[in-house]
Amino acid sequence: MSSDNIILEVKNLKKYYPVIKGFLKREVAYVKAVDGVDLFIKEGETLGLVGESGCGKTTLGRAVLQLVKPTAGEILFRYKKDNGSDDQQEVVNVTNATREELRKLRRYMQIVFQDPFSSLDPRMTIGTIVEEPLVIHKIGNKSEREDRVRQLLISVGLSPDHVGRYPHEFSGGQRQRIGIARSLALGPKLIIADEPVSALDVSIQAQILNLLDDLQSEFGLTYLFIAHNLSVIKYVSDRVAVMYLGKIVELAKTDELFANLKHPYSEALMSAIPVPNPDYQMDRILLEGDVPSPVNPPSGCSFHPRCRYAEEVCKTKVPLLRNLNNEHYVACHLAESLNLRCV
Amino acid sequence: MASLIEVKGLKTYFYTYRGVVHAVDGADFSIESEKALCVVGESGCGKSVTALSIMGLIEKPGKLESGEILYHRNGSVTDLSKLDPEGEVYRSIRGREISMIFQEPMISLNPVYTIGNQIMEAIILHQKVGKKEARMRALAMLKAVGVSLPSQRIDEYPHQLSGGMRQRAMIAMAISCNPKLLIADEPTTALDVTVEAQVLSLIRDLRKEFKMALMLITHDLGVVANMADEVIIMYLGKIVEKSNVKNIFHNTKHPYTQGLMNSIPSLTTTKKDRLIPIAGNVPDPLIALSGCCFESRCPQKTAICKGEIPPLKQVAPGHQVACWLYN
């Protein structure tokens, strides 16, 4: 595969949060929120990132935007500059970028947050909220910006007459649309959608999922779509990455992953989903216990204490993410020999 | 099977300074003993208020406006809606014969007492036993709900437990007096999928073991398919469809229920099948409607829908729908 259509490449990314104790504020341990993640996203695709709470998926998304500073690793972002006629591609290592460079970069990478109630300033009108990125980046004059805001509101399915209203006048789904309009304001290439529908009611979820889909084809967006709901992930993604305790345990094309599960954790995650069909009888694989603490993850494969296939080797040796075939990556010692249940 | 709870014409209104919210507006249903009833709807549809009305936990500015909540026990019938919510009789029922678990276990557990203390409180209050005996029972309950190392956990505080363990502790507390009815208000919404599966299978097992009826409030149709015998679908304070679980999924009648079914992605939908969302938003509950509550968002509406409220009508044995399409 040629590397020129890869928009984002993450190499061995780590984010450790120190645990500080005592009068001297010594660092006694580290929460390994993201612990050595490698992945890439191709232009125009949706990479779904799925995992349970505390697995590091949000930290990974924020680290890509440098909203949290990674402990180690590289994040390479390739983009074409909007100004200038030559199609010169720029490659930036986001982790080394200065504040000024980062601010320019954020034109091209944006985020949509989970909670539409806390991510909008209650004292700003939605016109000001959506216009703010344009003001910061000094784009257009006042009337051009106002036109742009109206256009944006229309493209996310809101009425342009709403510019003067405040966030509390809108419902959850509408607020999420405002958040999306704000992230689109600068014409980004990459959008990190961090659980954009999990705070919404089911009938509204579908509206937002369809909207994100439409915007992707309209503006040629690339999504890193973070969610804990596997059904949603399956619906939106071209490729899916499954995370567990700060590591990616399985990554493949969506159809391939769901038809051909290779990691025992993915299998358990899949079988835990309640299926909306009363005739569907399946003996579920119930995982024992909870997700272990990322402060002190288990030795070897971090999933081994909950894994029903675990063998001796799993307790001692950390499995690496390896390419099985056809870009189906899995981090499990036993991947070849296991015969896992699929959907 | 005999009815355990019969709710007739229940209306619970909230008198806010902006106007009257008809949170529950004429609900009729019954819960059979040892059966599971699922109440489905989006936020604001009145499903939690229905549960709180049965528990007698409606606080100001809310008011049980009218209707009956008939509770059948040992051959006699008590109308819970006529009882004083703080009176002796209600307090002997609440927590003992009808108990409830809530969505967010961290908020509903008291952070300054150990979970053992909190479970024992319910046992001592309702079963008139001593502290030692209560501790024994609390330990047994924790074991029954699958808490690991119960003898150690019993002296721990809520913040020391994980979300799944807290919800198990809540369940232990709720079933410690062997209730006839367990009301579970979105018990797994705050939990991860793998833990959700554990808790749901626990509730299912306990229901059989303790011969409890279950009223499960949820918005997740997957959970409904797994847990329910009977289902009611609520929208804006009204029951729009009521049937057994098979009919709800295979013989869906009400346009709102159909909309819900079409708008959820399942593991069998792929990117090519587009989701069909329900258009628009839930209308403002302060505005009184003269017609069907779903009229503003319904794709199949006709002239009559705006003018008259459709009654809940039987379309097949045990299957009722409130929609003019079937009248």
Image (cartoon, rainbow, N blue to C red):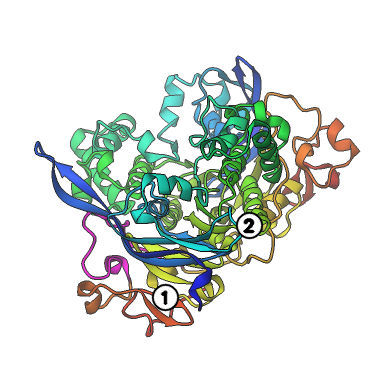
Look at the picture and state if A277 lies above or below A208. Answer: below
Q: Secondary structure at mark 2?
A: helix
Q: Which mark is residue A329?
A: 1
Does the segment drawn in magenta span residue A174?
A: no
Left-right relation of A150 to A235: right
Asked if residue B189 can be seen in this view, the reply is: no
What secondary structure is the stretch in magenta mostly built from? loop
Q: Which residues are magenta?
A: A284-307
Look at the picture and state if A259 lies above or below A130. Answer: below
Quadrant location, the C terminus of chain A:
bottom right
Left-right relation of B123 to B187: left
Q: Secondary structure at mark 1?
A: strand
| Residue position for label 2 | A216
Question: Which image quadrant for residue B193?
Answer: bottom left
Badge 1 local density, few (<14 within 10 Å), some, or many (20+)? many
Left-right relation of A315 to B200: left
Mark 1: amino acid: Tyr
Mark 2: amino acid: Gln
